[in-house]
Image (tube, rainbow, N blue to C red):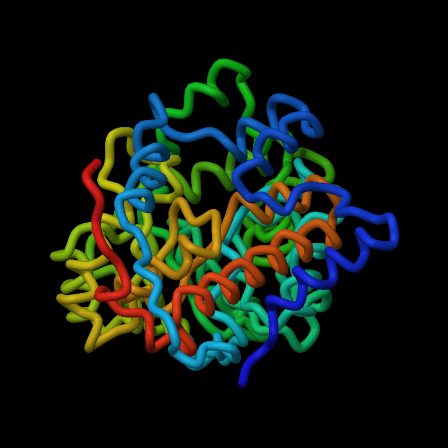
Amino acid sequence: MGERYSLYQSELYLQAYGGRTPEFTTDPTKLEDSAAELLDPGPFHYVAGGAGSGATMRANRDAFDGWRLVPRMLTDATERDLSTTVLGTQTPAPVLLAPVGVQSIVHPDAERATARAAAGLGLPAVLSTASSTSIEDVAAASGDGPRWFQLYWPNDPDVCRSILSRARAAGFSTLVVTLDTWSLGWRPCDLDRGYLPFLQGEGTAVPFSDPVFRSKLEAPPEEDLPSAVLRWISMITGTDRDWDALAFLREHWDGPIVLKGITHVDDARRAAEAGMDGVIVSNHGGRQVDGAVAALDALPEIVGAVGSRIEVLFDSGVRTGADVAKALALGARAVLVGRPWVYGLAHGGEDGVRHVLRSLLADLDLTMGLSGHRRLADLRPSSLTTVRR
């Protein structure tokens, strides 16, 4: 059988018996409040905030509450196996660390700490193009851990080719192409403070360490930061593409390619027709379009349309083990988790990320067992019931 993630519960109780309790909460719904006490308002709201009125973020959570697990008894679920393979990447649990940029605003160890924590648990971590740490340094921190690379698509093909080449050479196996953020959404929390960390050179380690990008500057970033920042921002914002553009990525990436930001079933079908290997059903955690469909509400139809042809992953609003189980029951191959472990990073660097992930995995393991599911394949739509919203 697989990892006994539920043993983390026993570990915590035994530590408490010896007089030691967790340094911060095991409740993912309380992490945001405690992170707010640790972080300055700018960084905190950059992580926690969403587009417009926050309606999409609320919809993401409401969608999870609209489904309920229906526990079954006497299923011999003493031992569970959470292991799976996602686009050729073997993982001990169906959980990936979502791409989150600018991690230096919450902890100085930034992406290195996250990479070490993920690798230690064997979970794939998706590195953002908006990383505060170079591709190569994150790869070194990850060691033998599974790692994917997320692309914010530069409109300069030479720079794009160079970044993709570096990521592949550094052992990143799968390319995640974020489609829904070619321009920032309307984010009042950031606008009211004028907070955009990229303007201070945060989250720019990938381009600033790229030889092709640097060759296009009149002066290196170390000598003229504002010009380098503005050149990079103009490269990754303001350009929406069409489906024909995907051929460029296929030409320059020889591994699996996944499109992130899919919520319409017709877009999922087009992704499959375009030869993509997977889609991530996601609304960017509610950070881009206010009043958009909840990602979980879009999941079942997309799975039904393309799930037999390409792999369907899920992202947006995942907080608990029950959330993971519900998304898997609705057909997701695996889920990506973002904000909770970022709050863990703020609380305690690598140890904080590890604590949040171990808590989530223990919660998932126990939820599966206590609801009568031994394996991931046992989670089906029939494992759930709907409630009136």
Q: Nearer the viewer, residue 134 or 36?
A: 36
Q: Quadrant of residue 357?
A: bottom right
Residue 273 is situated, as x and y percent measured from the top left of the image, at 15, 70
Q: Quadrant of residue 107?
A: top right
Residue 105 is situated, as x and y percent measured from the top left of the image, at 66, 36
Relative to 300, is 217 on the left or the right?
right
Q: Residue furthest top?
A: 192
Residue 162 is situated, as x and y percent measured from the top left of the image, at 51, 63
Q: Quadrant of residue 382?
A: bottom left
Residue 168 is situated, as x and y percent measured from the top left of the image, at 53, 73
Q: What residue is shown at x 36% (from left), y 34% (from top)?
A: 57
The N terminus lies in quadrant:
bottom right
Relative to 70, is 152 on the left or the right?
right
Q: What residue is shown at x 69% (from left), y 40% (from top)?
A: 346
Residue 87 visible in the shown view? no
Q: What residue is shown at x 68% (from left), y 28% (from top)?
A: 39
Q: What residue is shown at x 28% (from left), y 47% (from top)?
A: 295
